[in-house]
Amino acid sequence: MHFDKIIHATQYYRAPTPLKDEWESDISDMSEISIDTFQIRINWRWNERAMGIYDFSDVDELFDIAERNGKKVIIKFLLECAPQYVFDKYGGTIIGPKGELIRGGSHGAFYGGWKPCFTNPDVKRRASLFVEEVVKRYKDRKSLILYNAWNEIRNKPVEECFCPHCRAAFGRYLKEKFGTVERLNSFYGVAEESFENIALPSMPHGYWDTFEFKKFKGSYELYNYLSFVKDAVRKHDSLHPVMSHTGFCSAFQTHIGDVCDDFAVSRAVDFFGTSIPCLCNMDTEEKRLDFLMLNDYVRSVDKDYFLYEIYPGLGMFKDEYDTPFDMSFKLYSALASGAKGLVYWQYRAERVGMENDCAGLMRADGTPRPVASAVADFGKELERDMQYFLGAHPERADVAILFDFDSMLLSEIEDASGNNYSFDERKDALYYYKNSHAGMYRLLARGGVKVDYLSTREPKKLSDYKVVYLPYYNMLSPEFAEHLSEYVRGGGTLIADEGFGLREMNTWMQPYDVDFSAAKIRMLERRQMPSSVVIDGKSVNTSPFKTEYNVSGSHVALSFSDGTPAIYSVDSGKGRVYLSAFGLGYTYYVDESENLASYVLSLLSDLGVKPREDEKLSSEVFVRRLSDGTHNTTFVFNCSDDEYVSSITEAPLSFGGSATRKDDKISIPSHSIGYFVNKR
């Protein structure tokens, strides 16, 4: 943990709003809702309008006000708002796939100069100089606590950028990866002349070029963007941490037009976080489960993650404003998932551009929205019981969902490739990878089975889990196949969803045996077609594929209604592999079959994974826990219409939220969240 407390903050200023005559009262009033830290977005275009001429008078005054009022400050660099000279003098304009100029313009979030190509070395050099000027000016301010290097680091759309600098950089990336163009050509079965004149993708149909280009843009380049900002900071400030957060994290990603390889990109900075890419209101079970999944996933990227841009409803004159319960749910569930920073978007509702009326804890006139009371109450509890929350994390689960960025990316390319020579999102897209892991998460959570996320970049952690689920793991490398085989031989259990090992690492379909653990797996027929299985005498529709495998040494654990195998089981060493011939997680995501859930939960029970009865989710009440090794904090989320009452065996060291204690009972009123702390 980088701080001596969990950060409770709000975004406050991005030029031109809020207005100067509102600053003093706003920053002073933040104490009334228990917020002691605010963020300033330092806008490159705003503070360096002419090359080399810097005017930070607005930022100076905000720092002065912060220090008069005992507040801490986060600096976020908004480099995407580039000065005009970046385009006019240095040719920073993005070039689209058809050669069109995508000139920097204004957007609600990026008010002017959005955005240049940072692969252009002159653009990067000038941006670095700007960062250095900011750091030199504010590094010694006693109110400064951290830098956020980039707002919602991500690559969108797929067309960015096809300028000569990007083409050259893509060639350098491929040369670094393959060494010689002959090796590239041999691996992918292509005929490129050289890395210097490498072709850039114009459509997703060939797979390999889009796959490599999006890995280049959404992983390699984004890592470099964060790195050059951090390097500029570190030239003058070795003390304050540098973080970043993604806007649309990989777990929720649905299309190749919006990519961030969270696990790779996060390594460029000291710690990482995410905005909220799911719906704001917590009024349905599905929305609540998605929010829990978000926190569990991001914790696998960084255990001390920040939940950035917590929206109090999106606003924009829509019926999407949070109730106090919605806000409390988001805050306490993030805290219960181990978040070490919580940052609201934003203090005042926005007034400019397409985001007008967006997301303020306060209305545009500065008066509080109803959610402000929930924020104030949460902040008081956070401060009071900080000693129990700061060093605490959720206990490890018995089941992990294995997350593979390459498989996810290839799934999105498969979706896009059905279009008529474009990268547009298809109306009939399957979202196979995303819906598979989300479906299994919902199934397990509803069954009271705690689940963690685990990246394929951390194979040593496989042995920490009794069961590992692989959602549409289509890109199975020989190296990771051996890690999985070793895990199984040592006593672990894999549940591999349909499509396991479908592709070789060059994106080609695998027509031969996948040698895995004690089995050879060969796909014989794969069809996107409706089918069904029978579980406990009831027919369950399956989707999206029905696949016939030849699996050596297997027996059939479940059959399709036509008698063909639906789930294969293979014993290997001390462990076992289950291979599904349909989309197991995907089917549950689509139909939410109770019979399918019962089958999976029974399978897990036989493997020694049982639900914790006191944590078993219904659609209305569930429990989460944190532990710091000495204390347990139990959070109860009561989304029902009835009071929740639980017996306790000892007096809590502390309790909060809406929890009340009477004798040996803890009660939580309907539609509220409470917690209590006990010795471990």
Image (tube, rainbow, N blue to C red):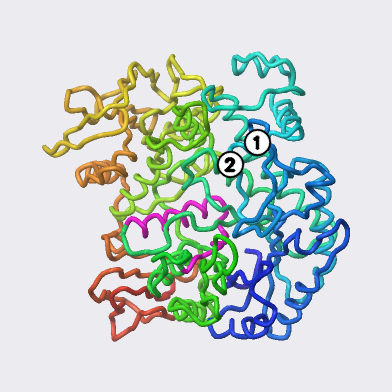
Residue 431 placement (x, y as % from top left): 41, 38
On screen, residue 128 versus residue 408, left or right, reads right
Q: Count residues near mark 2 (Cα–Cα under 10 Å), then give few for <14, some for 14-19, many for 20+.
A: some
Residue 460 placement (x, y as % from top left): 54, 41
The residue sitting at 55% across, 80% down in the picture is 365
Residue 154 higher or lower than 321, as above or below:
above
Q: Which amino acid lies under the numbered mark 2 shown in the image of this protein?
A: Pro
- Range shown magenta: 286-312
Quadrant of res 11: bottom right
The residue sitting at 72% across, 30% down in the picture is 167
The residue sitting at 48% across, 54% down in the picture is 277
Q: Which amino acid lies under the numbered mark 1 shown in the image of this protein?
A: Gly
* Quarter in which the N terminus is drawn: bottom right
Helix, strand or loop status at disc 2: loop
Q: Nearer the viewer, mark 2 or mark 1?
A: 1
Q: Which residue is mark 1?
A: 96
* Quarter in which the C terminus is drawn: bottom left
Q: Which residue is mark 2?
A: 157
The residue sitting at 55% across, 81% down in the picture is 366
Which residue ends up furthest to the right in the rendered image? 52
Residue 184 higher or lower than 347, as above or below:
above
Helix, strand or loop status at disc 1: loop
On screen, residue 7 versus residue 447, left or right, reads right
On screen, residue 536 versus residue 156, left or right, reads left
Does the segment drawn in magenta span residue 265? no
Residue 528 placement (x, y as % from top left): 32, 26
Residue 114 placement (x, y as % from top left): 68, 52
Quadrant of res 57: bottom right
